Amino acid sequence: MPLRLGWMLMLLCAALAVFAGVAEALDFDDEDPQPPHGEVGMVYEYEIGTHAGCLPHRLEIGSGQLPPGLSLRKVSEGPLDHSTFMLEGIPTESGAFSAWMHVLDCDNKSAELLFTFDISPRSFFITTERLAPASLGSAYSAKLDAPAPEPSNTTWKVTSGSLPAGLTLSPDGTISGTPTAVGSATFTVEATAVGRDSTGTRIASKQFTLDVRGSLAVNLSRSTAEVGVRFRAALVASGGTAPYTWSASGIPAGLAVNTDGTLTGTPRHTGTFTMTARVTDATGTARETQVRLLVRPRLAVATRALSAASVGRSYRFALRARGGVEGQRWSLRGRLPAGLRLQATGAIAGVPRAAGSARFTVVVRDALGARSAKTLTLSVR
């Protein structure tokens, strides 16, 4: 009887040893793992547990491929014979990816399991295409946009490069401030959308270039007009971003400013007029500047009569004009006494060769196209 009992005890111990060996075989915690669905641009985390065998455990990729952008990290070891690994990162490619993972223990015993990861295309984008240029010294504001596919709280930051001096990016995606230097700045912004109902965190980034141009300046292409003469000039802007839109006040009677900046009409009164011109560029930046326009009296020949000339003696007489603008030139209709000629500057000069008198018409023109004529008589003794 004691002998039979001894054999039974031996058999029971052997069975328990076999059972313990089976129970303690190295393995993954989940025999049928179903990794969570991922998305390009969404933060991904998947915990993988291992147990049994002897510590330390290590996890390797035997064959296949993890989704690009993801990597394995050991999180903890223990208690007892358990280890925890984390597959984490931000997927950069969509598709179905399969990988055989091997867990190995301190005796190089191993277990393997096939993991399949389904990564869908990106659904979170920065939709702002480009940034409008800014103007030196003028307030600037631009709102970046990145609509999330579901209710989210989105925050923004600059991850590389820097904004133009004087500008900042707020967490809500608004670039604002007053540029303090002309130039071009290239930088990368990152938008992070955290789902309000624990649906995940999405991240998108994009590079922008923001130009800061010289401050808006305004000039008038022609600053002198003439009463009764058709006038055309242009308000000209430098700096800022074309196209420009114009308006003005204090305009002389007879003239008008079009939205494209042309100043046209026929002035009715003389004087010096100070107009206030307002220009708005394509970014909405506006500036008011005062420009001056001088309206001169109408051009007229002022000479009433010519002094007499003498045969054989040098003669010179300067014709005079009043009003008009600079750039006056004179011409003649008819004939002067023999030996004399009219210069473009308005001087009649020469040496008369014969006595008599001549009747002729002098004509003066100015740079605006105004013209005045007068008929005169010149006697030669």
Image: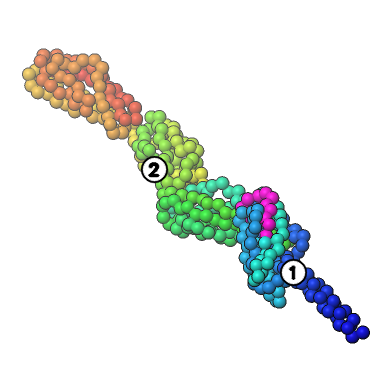
Query: Looking at numbered disc 1 in the image, what kind of residue is underneath it?
Result: Ala
Look at the image and give the residue range highlighted in magenta. Answer: 91-101
Look at 65% across and 58% down and name the residue there: 62
Given residues 208 and 83, the one toward you in this image is 83
Q: Which residue is mark 2?
A: 219
151 versus 333 height, above or below: below
Rendered image: mark on residue 25 = 1
Magenta stretch: dominant SS?
A: strand
Residue 178 in the image, given as x and y percentages of width and height: 47, 57
Q: Nearer the viewer, residue 84 or 161?
A: 84
Q: Residues within 10 Å of mark 2 (few under 14, many from 20)?
A: some
| Mark 2 residue type | Asn
Residue 320 visible to the viewer: yes
Please state the horizontal and vertical placement of residue 4, each as a whole percent of the image: 90, 81
Looking at this rendering, what residue extends furthest in the left direction?
312
Residue sitting farthest toward the bottom: 2
Q: Is residue 134 magenta?
A: no
